[in-house]
Amino acid sequence: MNAETVKILIAMILYMLVVVGIGLFFARRANQSSENYFLGGRSLGPWIAAMSAEASDMSGWLLMGLPGVAYWTGLADAAWTAIGLAAGTYLNWLIVSKRLRRYSVRAGNAITLPEFFSNRYHEKKPVLLTLAAFFILIFFTVYAASCLVTVGKLFSTLFGAPYILMMIVGAAFVLIYTILGGFLAESASDFMQGIIMFAALIVVVTAGTAAAGGPATVLEHARSIPGFLDFFGVAVPATDAAGVQQTSQGLPQFAPAAPYGWLSILSTLAWGLGYFGMPQVLLRFMAIRKESELKQSRRIAMVWVLISLAIAVSIGLIGRALYPTALQTASQSENVFIELATDLLPPLFAGFVMAGILAATISSSDSYLLIAASSVARNIFKGLFFKKSSDQAVMRVSRLTLLLITIVAIFIALDENSVIFSIVSFAWAGFGATFGPLMLFSLFWKRSTRAGAIAGSLGGAATVFIWKLAIRPLGGIWGIYELLPAFIISSLLIIVVSLLSPPPSEAIQDEFEAARQGLSPEPADPETRKPDRATHCS
């Protein structure tokens, strides 16, 4: 390890010590109750709610996955995905956040999504609760694996150490940190990490543009590659059987540009639909201290998202101009941010920029682990099997669950050639189709029923797997991103089954109207809050 690498390592260690310090600071408060541990006692301010929501949402794929897509195939795929994500972010904050914050308090003071769905439909037998908890466990384990791949690639690229060893070290750090502080520590550190991610993007895009000779030079190079700068065409790297891009006379080789038609555009825009079912974002809506502060949070979140997505795509284009042949596979292309930072910045400063990737990864993986653990401990262990278990027992189970999920995620992340963007896209589709329509109909359609909610959730999840594994490989019109057909099928099932089943009870409809009209109670002390039905169902 040379002197420059040591300086990078020192900067990253300093960053990690700060993150651990935040976890220790909040540990005592987090351990007072499961509500504090899992939702922070609904005490988030607008800045922390906004920044932690976006930092935990974007994860390492913002700094590695999205620039990698732009580097590998050009503007279209990355830009249309970014547009879909920006639109989804705005609509989620605009139409879901306020109603969910209000309704989650009204519906038995639910502090997890499975509890909210179960309480919303007044379940007596916790079928919906169990299904929601199970799907959260499945998809967040996959999501956590994508974060570990990011950490493994980062440390392996920087320090030349074995990928698997570095991935396991990163997993251990995230696990310890999440166990320490719970939701409050996670949200506070995510605020800091959102700032670091934002700063890292700006620094790298500025240094990269200058090194490439300015924006005009970057655009000129991009135009020289067939389809690279098109919105309705896509570059096609000429690769061998192993997926390695071919070079000739020091230049990367590309096949003729492929069309980027309306099906591809719908696929990428469909990423925006996923937001309506993203637990890590929806929980921030539930956790903000005042409903009135959501408008300010929305503005903060949108500024962060629009600038960050635009810069991430630009970094991929700049990286192709500066390093045309350095990254020769789709997996390697996701290291373009690392290459730019380590080559163009002083070592100590590069270390802090690399901490931006670590920040993105930690801010997401701790959210994923905590939400999955809360689903198992609160909704399955207590809500289904041991209804009279104490808060301390629930928290012990949650920590054991954190360990088990991390171990499974490590096994999923063992392949260092995994493409982060692909792993994230599958988990994103899973959440978007399983919970997105369910969330919208729960909040905005009084006639939706428990039977419809169960059918929609099951149908959405099943369609994601079937479409991904059996239908999408057929190509052609079937090659559309699995989130879109799964979201449509889930929505149709909720509508049809709800209309075929008996209307909701008068109590459910009254509660719906109270939430709609803003009559939600706002108790000052968690001790006075109404106990949630989901943990007392028969």
Image (cartoon, helix red, strand yellow):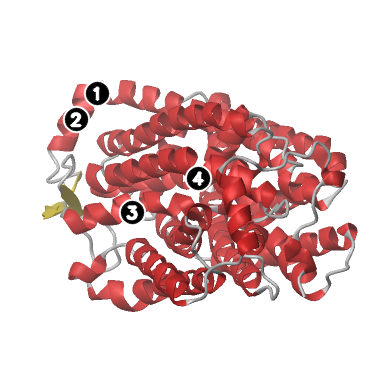
Instruction: Find the distance from the CA under tag 2 to the CA under tag 1.
Output: 6 Å
Write down the residue under mark 2.
219
Mark 2 or 3, closer to the camera: 3
Write down the residue under mark 1.
215
Q: Secondary structure under badge 4?
A: helix
Instruction: Find the distance from the CA under tag 1 to the CA under tag 4.
Output: 38 Å
In the image, residue 188 lies at what x, y percent? 69, 34
Amino acid type, mark 1: Pro
**Depth order, front residue of 505/405:** 505
CB under 8 Å between discs 2 and 1:
yes
Mark 1 or 3, closer to the camera: 3
Mark 4 or 2, closer to the camera: 4
Using the rendered view, name the quadrant where residue 123 is placed.
bottom right
Amino acid type, mark 4: Val
Write down the residue under mark 4.
96
Q: Secondary structure under badge 3?
A: helix
For the question of whether residue 328 can be seen, the reply is: no
Of the numbered discs 2 and 3, the one sitting upstream in the chain is: 2
Instruction: Find the distance from the CA under tag 2 to the CA under tag 3.
Output: 28 Å
Instruction: Find the distance from the CA under tag 4 to the CA under tag 2.
Output: 39 Å
Mark 2 surroundings within 10 Å by alpha-carbon count, few (fewer than 14), some (14 through 19), many (20 or more):
some
**Depth order, front residue of 508/288:** 508
